[in-house]
Image (tube, helix red, strand yellow):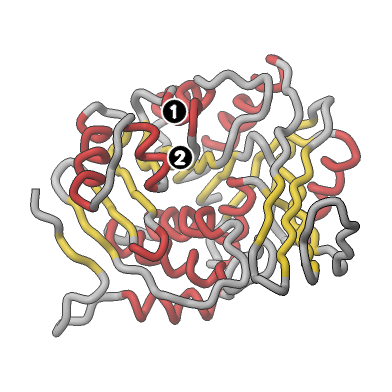
Amino acid sequence: MSIVTLTMNPAIDLATTAAHIAPTDKIRCTAPRFDPGGGGINVARTVAALGEPVTAIFPAGGPPGRLLEELVRDAAIPMRPVPVADHTRENFAVTATDTGEQYRFVLPGPRLTAPEVHRCLAEIERAAQECRYVVASGSLPPGVPATFYQTLADLLSDLGVPLVLDTSGAALRAVGHGVHLIKPSVRELTEFAGRPLPDRESRVAAARELVERGVSEIVVVSMGAAGTLAVTRDDARWLTSIEVPVRSGIGAGDAQVGGIVVGLARGYPLDAAVRLGIAAATAALASPGTGPGRPDRIAELFQQLSPRPDAGRGQVAIPY
C-alpha cells in the first residue's frame, strides 16, 4: 500500500436539501445522501479517486459503525476498522434551496476507552510497515487525549514513515515535533499562533515558526479563495486558487490533503503536490455531499494551475 489514513472520529455524513429553513416549523427535506465521513476517510476517497493505493483505518461501533463500514466498502476503499463499544457518530448537513445556505450539524462522536485507543495505534503500527505516508485527519473523539497525534508522530518517526496531519484545536496545539507536513486553515494557524494573522506575510511568519520549532517540516496553509501557502525552512510560496461554483464545501479541505499526499507519494516537487491538492479541493466543491471530485476534472484543473514556461501563473515566491 502507498498511503494509510487514520480517522479517529469517523462519521456517517448525511446530506439533504430543504426549500426553506426556519425555527419551530417542521422542515420537509429531500431524500438523504449517505457518505462515509471523517477527515481521514474523506482523504482516502480522494486518494482512491486519483488511483493511488490507500487503506483507511478507523474505529467503528454499533449499528452506525456497521453502516460506515458498508459505505467505505461501497466506495471500494480497503479498510481496517477497529471495533469499539460506543456508537459511531452521525453528522448531517441541510442546504436551503431558497438561499443556497448550508447548515452543518456535527456531533461529538463516541467515547473511546484507553484499550480502544491503543488498538487504533497498534493497527497503524502494523499498516505503517508497508506504506509510504500516513495521513491523520480530523478531530479526536471523547476519551482520546489531546496528545494522541504527538504519540502517533513519535511512533511513526521511530518507524521512518512520514506523517501528514490535518487537525485543529487542542489536538493541534499538543503537537510539538515530528510531523512531516501539517495543513492548517488560516483560522487554525491563527489559533495555534495565538495572535492575529491578517495578511500573507504574517501567515508565512507564523508557519515558519512552526518549522523552526521542529513541529513540522512543511506547513501548508489553506486560505480558501485566497489560495494556499506552502512554507518550509528555506522557501515560501503562494499558490493561486480557481474560482468555481460551489455545490458543497464539505470535505474540500480533506480533498486538498488527499491531492497533496498523492503528489508527494508520486515524487512531485512540493509546489506541484500542493497544486494537485488545490485541484482536488476545487473539483470536490462541485461534488454532492462529501464526494471526491472526478479524476478527469482534477487532472484538468491541475493543468490549469501548472505554471507555463512563458508565465509565472500558479505560484509566487514570497521574499522573507
Who's the residue at 47% across and 24% down the image?
Answer: 155
* Between discs 2 and 1, the one toward the N terminus: 1
Q: Pinpoint residue 19: horizontal percent, then vertical percent.
A: 79, 71
Residue 86 sits in which quadrant?
Answer: top right
Q: Mark 1 is on which residue type? A: Ala
Horizontal side of residue 281 vs 213, given as left or right: right
Q: Is residue 222 above or below residue 275?
A: above
Residue under numbered circle 2: 165
Which residue was labeled with disc 1? Answer: 153
Residue 136: give x, y in percent of width and height. 53, 39
In this rendered view, identify the residue nearer to me: 206 or 273: 206
Side of 65 where 82 appears, left or right: left
Dot 2 lies on which element? strand
Give the spatial CA distance, label 2 vs label 1: 9 Å
Comparing 99 with 168, the one in front is 99
Q: Residues within 10 Å of mark 2 (few under 14, many from 20)?
A: many
**Residue, x 24% and y 27% (percent of image)?**
213
In percent of width and height, residue 294 lies at: 58, 75
The quarter of the displayed image where residue 287 is located:
bottom right
The residue that appears at 50% across and 43% down in the rendered structure is: 135
Q: Is residue 30 left or right of residue 186?
A: right
Q: Is 297 positioned to the left or the right of 86 in the image? A: left
Q: Residue furthest bottom?
A: 310
Q: Which quadrant holds residue 242?
A: bottom left
In the rendered view, tell whether residue 139 sits above or below residue 35: above
